[in-house]
Amino acid sequence: MTNLLFHLAIPINDINKAKPFYVEALGCEVGRESSQASILNFYGHQVVLHTTKEPLSHQNGIYPRHFGLIFLEEKDWENVLEKAKNHHLTFYQEPRLRFSGQLTEHRTFFLEDPFYNLLEFKFYRHYEAIFGGREVAEVGDR
């Protein structure tokens, strides 16, 4: 199945506070919108921002919850990195190279949106590491 789009709903508490991050800085397009939710075109995928009255808080570390994008072209990863820097977005983890010299080598950085949702943006040096590389047992950091 290749004719699919990914859908993700995330909690926020203010749509107008979300737009500078997602629309202005990251370049997402707004679709349908109500006072309770906003649908975004997140690089060809659907992210829905749902407002909540529940308190939102920082996550301690990147696990277990984060979402993001895997770029197939390194220049596209670099372009989003520059957007994030130019808009002074909050880096939860600065850009770095993970698993250097291994099949799973990739460049990554994490952003934190104004509602403490963590977003990872990465580029794998070897395409097959995205879903394959079963001979490598490591997934994530130790």
Image (cartoon, helix red, strand yellow):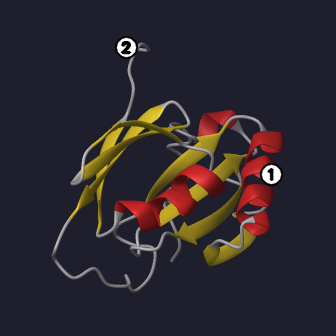
- Horizontal and vertical percent for residue 84? 70, 63
Amino acid type, mark 2: Met
Q: Quadrant of residue 95?
A: bottom right
Where 4 falls versus 68 (above or below)? above
- Horizontal and vertical percent for residue 11? 28, 63
Q: Residue at x 48, y 60 (%)?
A: 139
Crowd class of label 2 (few under 14; some 14 to 19; many from 20; radius 10 Å): few
Amino acid type, mark 1: Glu
Q: Quadrant of residue 125?
A: top right
Q: Nearer the viewer, residue 58 or 52?
A: 52
Q: Which numbered marker is on residue 1?
A: 2
Nearest-to-viewer mark from 1 and 2:
1
- Horizontal and vertical percent for residue 22? 53, 54
117 relative to 120 in the view: left or right = left
Q: Residue at x 37, y 14 (%)?
A: 1
Residue where numbered disc 1 is placed: 78
138 relative to 36 in the view: left or right = right
